[in-house]
Amino acid sequence: MKVLVIGGTGLISGSAMRLLKRQGHSVTVFHRGHTPLETPGVSEILGDRQNRRDFEAKLRPLRFDAVIDSILFTPEDAASTLRAFAGRVKHYQFVSTVCAVGAPLVKIPSDETEPYQPVSGYGRNKAAAEKLLLNAHRKSGFPVCIVRPSHTYGPGARWALGTFLSDWGTDCELYNRILRGKGVIVHGDGENLWQSCIADEVAEGMVGALARKKTLGQIYNLCGHEVVTWDQFYAKVGQALGKKPRIFHLPTEAILAGAPESATGFLKDIARYHGAYSIAKAQRDIPEFRPRTPLEKGVKTHFNWVKSRGYLHQAPPRPFEDRLVKVAASLLKK
């Protein structure tokens, strides 16, 4: 296939691009050129997605069998997509997010029929873009397929210091805290559900969907096969590092009140709710999608990668988490 990847320098799109090349496809990447590509043998088109006139002018004359769009964030982006690709591509894949359905989930695990009730601005914009593209499919047959990853991790996230996850969003400071024996805060009672998937396995689902007509007009959750509680999540990270984490619980509202607002967006909008999603539909329609890497093994791979690149030393410290740990410890003594 002749495939265009819009983005290509992020974790998920980079994994998809490497898989496409291994399978022998012709790959072109549209990106700004700010971050060097790590996949050899791809063609490049330089441009800024937000300069929509330029974006459309550069891509409208071209023809591709498939497009993977990893940097579509708003309904305005989606409208630009239709102007650029309607009638000119056989398969357009929008990399959305489970945040588009929001929370709290109506059923657990949630499937692709979950009603839209996004919490964050990010989720609301992705949801609006989904609706616009699906409406175009119903009205004019625009060949869209929507994939919704959840927490995706793995080697390759150079742009964010080798991202990993904690209540504070994505960086790799959680690794440092566990290794140094520092306490880590978990919201609530630690029983909220969470689901992670290594990026290469999300990419298998994305690329596998491209060649199948049955995926057009459909939405697929591309998430991991393990659903764990947050306490279990932290424990598995500790097992991968060979050190048991010192977990301290605090009510979500106490954490939000005791930490800087700039650090609490992920907890406020996402982590405080259950995040468990059914992948049965994707596994049925896309046989290549077979998430199988145990979380502990995936974390060990990711940790070795960030350590080898010095990202652990660049992760921002969290003195406010130290203060919250002291509060939680004092409550345990009462």
Image (spheres, rainbow, N blue to C red):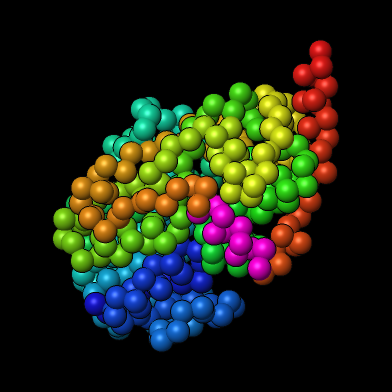
Q: In this view, does 269 lie above or below 40?
A: above
Q: Residue at x 63, y 43 (%)?
A: 238
Q: Residue at x 51, y 79 (%)?
A: 37
Residue 209, image x, y percentages: 25, 60
* 229 relative to 225 in the view: left or right: right
**Residue 307 is one of the magenta-drawn residues:** yes
Looking at the figure, which quarter contains the N terminus? Answer: bottom left
Q: In this view, does 29 lie above or below 172?
A: below
Looking at the figure, which quarter contains the C terminus? Answer: top right
**Residue 69 is one of the magenta-drawn residues:** no
Residue 146, image x, y percentages: 32, 54
Q: Which residue is drawn at 38% across and 29% down?
A: 108
Residue 302 appears in the figure: yes
In front of the other: 41 or 105? 41
Res 23 → quadrant: bottom left
Q: What stretch is highlighted in magenta?
A: 298-308
